[in-house]
Image: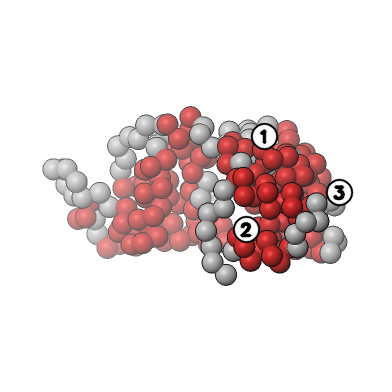
């Protein structure tokens, strides 16, 4: 099965032909090279938002903190499956709902979401020390690569955080060393200092993984009620 980018118009045509009974599911999946779950998402978004729900610009939808909290509480109380809750609150994707659930269960504040194109991504970068970069990357990883939260907390740019996390994933704590400029290079840090920085980020990653395992276990229990 091949994969290619499917246009908004193709998605709408495929969903409408399926709902009208003109085409069978397996022929649509084969034509567009998509998985069954992906097509189910198209159908759900079409039923909730109409044709606009399958256009890229619709992903800019924003949700208040109250809406996020209500959706999470409804789901955790067993008021419906994830698909049911997404339909009720007009949530574009289940992954978005799942992210809110993780934040709620980890006692993190649910903030109004701005959708793509938010001015949060226009935040300018600033100079940082090695210790700051370690702290920022640790925070970002511990919180599920929540770049927006890190931008708001530390006042750095999206490009900076994305680059630091990528470099850490590629090279470890060594990737966060800034070797530019004439001041004493950070590369002269002792191995002990680098090891401490590495351990700090690894501890943050372990905390995130432990939380994700606990949340996934809870979600599986809840989803089991709707199977």
Can the viewer see residue 187? yes
Q: Residues within 10 Å of mark 2 (few under 14, many from 20)?
A: some
Q: Position of residue 137 (x, y in %)?
A: 42, 50
Disc ID at residue 211: 2
Q: Residue at x 51, y 34 (%)?
A: 117
Mark toward the viewer: 3 or 2: 3
Q: Earlier in the sequence, mark 2 or mark 1?
A: 1
The residue to which callout 1 is attached is 63
**What element does badge 3 sit on?**
loop
Q: Is residue 86 above or below residue 25?
A: above
Position of residue 158 in the picture relative to residue 2 (left or right): left
Q: Are marks 1 and 3 in contact (CB under 8 Å)?
A: no
Q: Is residue 168 above or below residue 55?
A: below
The span from disc 3 to disc 2 (Cα, nearest Å) is: 23 Å
The span from disc 1 to disc 3 (Cα, nearest Å) is: 20 Å
Q: Earlier in the sequence, mark 3 or mark 2?
A: 3
Q: Residue furthest front?
A: 22
């Amino acid at each position: 099965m091949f994969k290619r980018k499917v246009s908004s118009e193709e998605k709408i045509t495929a969903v409408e032909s399926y709902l009208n009974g003109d085409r069978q599911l397996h022929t649509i999946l084969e034509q567009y090279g998509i998985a069954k779950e992906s097509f189910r998402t198209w159908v759900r978004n079409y039923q909730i938002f109409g044709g606009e729900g399958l256009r890229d610009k619709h992903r800019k939808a924003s949700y208040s903190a109250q809406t996020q909290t209500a959706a999470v509480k409804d789901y955790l109380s067993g008021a419906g499956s994830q698909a049911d809750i997404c339909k009720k609150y007009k949530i574009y994707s289940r992954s978005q709902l799942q992210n809110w659930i993780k934040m709620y269960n980890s006692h993190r504040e649910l903030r109004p979401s701005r959708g793509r194109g938010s001015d949060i991504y226009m935040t300018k970068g600033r100079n940082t020390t090695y210790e700051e970069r370690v702290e920022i990357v640790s925070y970002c990883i511990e919180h599920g690569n929540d770049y927006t939260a890190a931008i708001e907390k530390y006042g750095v740019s999206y490009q900076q955080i994305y680059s630091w996390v990528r470099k850490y994933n590629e090279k470890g704590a060594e990737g966060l060393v800034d070797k530019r400029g004439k001041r004493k290079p950070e590369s002269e840090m002792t191995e002990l200092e680098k090891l401490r920085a590495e351990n700090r980020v690894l501890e943050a990653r372990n905390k995130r993984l432990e939380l994700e395992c606990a949340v996934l276990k809870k979600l599986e229990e809840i989803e089991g009620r709707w199977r």
